[in-house]
Image (tube, coloured by chain):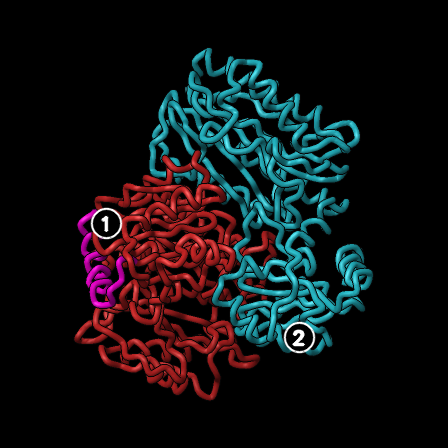
Amino acid sequence: MRTMQPSVTIGSYTWAQDRLPSDEFELRLADLRAAMERNSWPAVLVYGDVRDHAALAYLSNFIPRVRWGMALLPRSGDPRLLCAMSTRDLPAMRGLTWIADVRSGMGPEWTKAFDPWFEQLKTDQPLELGTLGFDLMAPVLVQAAHRSLGEHFTLLHADDILTVPPERKRPRELTMLRASGKLVESAAKRFVESWRKSGEPESAALDAERLARSLAAQDVRTLISLDGGRTLTPFAGRFEKIAGPLVGYVAVKLAGYWTDVFVTADENPSPAARRVAAALDALIAAVKPGTRAGDLFAVVAEALAPYSLHPALSGNAGHGIGLSLDEPPEFCADSETELVEDGVYALQAGIADAEAGNAIVSAIVRNTASGAEVLLRSPA
Amino acid sequence: MDERIAVRKNIRLAAAAKYLANNNRDGLIAASNGLNNFLESNAVYVLSGCRPMGESAVVLDRDGRSTLIVTPAWDAERAAALSWTDNTIATDDLAAALASAVGTHHIAVPRSLSIGLSLLGSGIAARIEAALGALPQAADEFARDLARIRTAEELKAAEHATWIAERGYEHLLECARPGMREYELAAELYCFTKKLGAEDNFLLMSASQHNLAVRAAGERILDVGDIILSEITPCYRGQFAQICRTTVIGEPRPVVREKYAILQDAMRAGLEAGRAGTTVADVTHAINGVISQAGYGDYCRPPYMRVRGHGLGITSDRPGDIVDSNGRVLEAGMVFVMHPNQYLPESGYLMCGEPVVVTDQGCRALSAQLAQLDVIPV
């Protein structure tokens, strides 16, 4: 779900070694190194920025708070992490990642930090390096990378070859997603309670945010409706009283892992509210390993008929979730992607209709061999 | 459209259209990556008044007709309500919508200018280039130059953002206590400033008995003797304003008071030096001069400090970083943060900074109370 990107994220990003120890990253890197071996890449370069950093976070635990970061991961030898921060800020950056060698890549520091690292990889023949996330990188930085690598290396976009992070979640990822889910559930409950007291959607969203942040959330995003659920809008600080229903959204990031949930609350549930709850039930029941994402969209479309999916859901009945709020696959009408066991997915159903009313609900599930395990669901 | 919006439309869009006409250009494409960097000018915000959530663009032709394009598609009504462009389009395919708008405005891309395309991801930039058939000539400094002087309304918003920052700091003084984690204090401060109307806040806040720099809040538990550094930067109606503060839990060591006074002296020298017509380098020299005179000339460089201040987005980050290599001339009405923040070996890193507006008499702090070394009694 797209929300307003804050200028900086303020929660604690210190590497939680008790929850995500170094051996976890060694295993993740081992998988990547096997892919390097298969593709004859001496290294993979992984880029991420403040908004999109799932691959970078998966492999390094580093999440840029401002600007960008890039991990230089060799098939053998020691990795290096570049971040777009001043040398003054490097001691703090070193506490955010398991990678020992952290350098500034800003301005003149780029050539000091990026260029020399590749000396160890050079051979007589040009070599191909895999890249992840380079589509997110500003053209000027891409050009700087090409200049630095010269004729010794060529860059190959590996995003279509490697799925990083993998759709199937690792055990520790599932643990983090459960913890994140508990936090977002608490925040959603506070969202509704606060709205019932104040009638101000923005105050309610802020109360939910405050709760999540006080419980160590790294980031909190909210959307609210100022027109009874027909449209959604980001926080603007106006705090107007709005007649119901309350329709809103809250997302929470904990130790890198996002979970999110829609809230819909009204004194007297509308036909739309009843219909979307039933659609979500149908969606949850249809989740199994091997199910096509497009088929799940069809399940929701049928359950909502004659109404169509709420426009705020952008034609998706769900998507993957984890180190990004929007991981693949999208559950859109034409998606052929099959869901995998131990994949974690956000499922969503919503209606905006002048007569039936407006409502959006969602759930997060883990896909198991016996069907969906519901990790959380919109508050009743 | 209310009067406030109409005035801003006249100022920024009309000036941009006039520039295009005078320079024989067909049009302007201004893009934003939606990342809201508080140190950058957001050209889409400057030209439309809408802070975008995703990648977005404004198309302006030389006759002054304008179109805002935002992503995602469901953001249509908010964007249209905020924007003072003639048209607003919401889409999930920026490249295609941009190509369509360029056609509607009858703009020849090779005879046009662009802002901010270089900040977009290379993937979307390549899709835009393919959709347009070429890229316009980059004029990335144009929006920040256009908006370098705050309008009266923008200055008022910056003053209000400063008021929020100061109330936020007062709240920090009330809340901070031994046993609290940094992130808990940051959460309280962040949400408090949002409750006062801040739509964003670039907040760095950390503590140590001997700080090396300010950083984002972590899990550290506050205790007696900790020196809390805070860089509180709320944004109100598109205007970021930053105050930098230093707070000690319990009575500070005398040397900390002594060294903090050096930063206060440097700040006063900077305020006095920052008259319209002088350069950024002059201000930097005035600040560094005080610190050098106190015997710390070797510390006036990274990693002991970064810059002596900087412009504030998201309209214009002019006059840029306050460093001795910046020869930009200060103009009345420019707003930036001046901060002689400094690591000194005896005290660690200390922070002292105010948002200022340039006047003919010097820089005027927007804050009611200049930074002092504050103490939380225990």
Chain letter, disc 1 residue: A
SS for tag 1? loop
Magenta span contains residue A153: no
- Residue B167, quarter of the rendered image: top right
Foreground pick, A289 / B317 = B317
Task: Please report the residue visible at 57 percent of the width from the left and 50 percent of the height from the top.
Answer: B199
Task: Please report the residue visible at 70 percent of the width from the left and 78 percent of the height from the top.
Answer: B104
Q: Which residues are magenta?
A: A19-43
Magenta span contains residue A35: yes
Say which colour chain A has: red
Q: What residue did someone put label 1 on?
A: A20
SS for tag 2? helix
- Distance from Cα at disc 2 to Cα at disc 1: 48 Å
Q: Badge 2 local density, few (<14 within 10 Å), some, or many (20+)?
A: many
Describe residue A338's horizontal placement relative to residue A3 as left or right. left
A72, above or below A156, in the image? above
Chain letter, disc 2 residue: B
Q: In this orientation, does residue A380 appear? A: no
- Residue A355, quarter of the rendered image: bottom right
Task: Please report the residue visible at 64 percent of the width from the left and 55 percent of the height from the top.
Answer: B140
Q: What residue did someone put label 2 on?
A: B101
A208, above or below B84, in the image? above
Q: Quadrant of the N terminus of chain B?
A: bottom right
